[in-house]
Every structure is written in C-alpha cells, then in structure tokens.
Amino acid sequence: MNAMTMRIDIVSDAICPWCWIGRANLAAALEELGWDADIHWHPYQLNPDMPRAGVERAAYRTQKFGSLARSQELDAQVAASGAASGLTLRMDLQKRTPNTVQAHRLAKFADRHGQQNAMVDAMFQAYFQQGRDIGDDALLTELAAGLGLDAAGFLASHECEDEVLAEDANFRRMGINGVPSFALAGHILFSGAMPPPQMAAAFRRGEALLREKGLLPTP
C-alpha cells in the first residue's frame, strides 16, 4: 500500500444513486492514484422537507417529474451509468422515498466504531439493490447488526440529529447544491460522479494546488 494517505471527505445522501456511483468511481480513481485514502462521509439531504416517514415513491416521482414513465426513463439512465461503474441498481424495487436523517445519524454512529465506510456501503446496497426502506429504524438496526454494531438505542434517541441538520444546512450555505461533493484535505474540489480517470485527474490538480499554497505538506 502506498505510504501516502490523503483525507477525502464526501458530502452525500444515502438515497442519491450518483453518490453510490461516485463511491465506486472513487475506488477506481484511488487505485490509479496509488493513494491510501482516509474517507469520511458527511450528511446532505436531497429532500430536506421530506416527511419523517417518507412517501410512496411512485406518486412522489410522478409529481416531481410529471409522469411515472418519465421517472422510469431517468431511472434507466442512472442504472446504465451504474452498470458502467460495476454496480447493479434496481430502482424498480424501491417502494418508498425515505427521509434520510436516521441514515445520516447511523453513519455518524458507525464512524465512532471505525465502520462508517462499511455502513454507508450497506445502506447503498440495501436501498439500490434490494429496494429496502433505509428510513426505517428496524432496517437500519439490522444493517448495523450485520457489522457487529448495536444501534437500536442510538437510533431511538435524538443523539447527533442536531449535528446532522446543522451540517446539512452549512453545506447549503457554502453553495453546495449537488452531491456527491468531494473534498481533499478539507477543501472542496468538485461535485459529481465523474468517471475514474477524470476523477483521478481532478484530485491530482487539487493536490498540486493545495501543495502550492502550503495547504498540504510536501511528501
């Protein structure tokens, strides 16, 4: 493993397919770069006004895009992009569009135990491959248990909820209006799930600029 370790922060939402695609593309970009990355996930809500119980997905998407057929066309386009990154996305299995505050809280809980990346991956897989409701505490508890974590008490509390909402609001004030957004050494570089070669090139440019400004140490 390369001795160079870079901190990469990802602003993401658990129901954003491009965030999962970006996660896959990042892994390929890091391999090209030869970096050992210290990855941290941060909360952003695509639907900050979503009811806590979520909504029925077909009706919500029909209202949002004008018709169910148009929603399905967009889903097919995203699934094709996912396939190009080695992922299988089954949006046809999704029955609800959830509120993601609990999912973001769970990611913070998992981070305390060194399991944040695995927890985020588990939520992506549950939602995009199995169509499961990641706004449901019972499912989130199950996913956490799969990593050896007992999250039931945490999820039943309000711990970290204010932190999640404050981070989400702060990213909006910073001008972030799309996810995934990627930061290197605490500095936002770009947004979007660009293909691995372009992503690697963007990180190289960011690294060079940060070193030039003295914001990264000379290796």
Image (tube, rainbow, N blue to C red):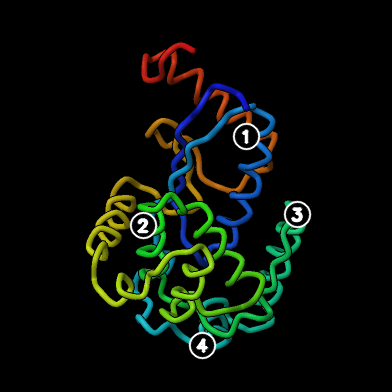
The amino acid pointed to by label 2 is Lys
Callout in the foreground (1, 2): 2
For label 1, the residue is: 30
Q: In the rendered view, tell whether residue 183 sits above or below residue 132.
A: above
Q: Residue furthest front?
A: 148
- Residue mark closest to the camera, 3 vs 2: 2
Q: Which residue is mark 2?
A: 108
Q: Nearer the viewer, mark 4 or mark 2?
A: 2
Task: Give the residue displayed 35% in from the left and 52% down from the top.
Answer: 112
Q: Quadrant of residue 161?
A: bottom left
Q: CA distance from mark 4 to mark 2?
A: 27 Å
177, 186: nearer the viewer: 186
| Horizontal side of residue 197 vs 182, given as left or right | right
The relative height of residue 45 versus residue 191 in the rendered view (above or below) is below
Few, some or many C-alpha atoms within 10 Å of disc 2 (few <14, some 14-19, many ≥20)?
A: many
Tell me if residue 211 comes above or below residue 32 in the rendering. above
Residue 60 shown left or right of residue 210 in the figure: right
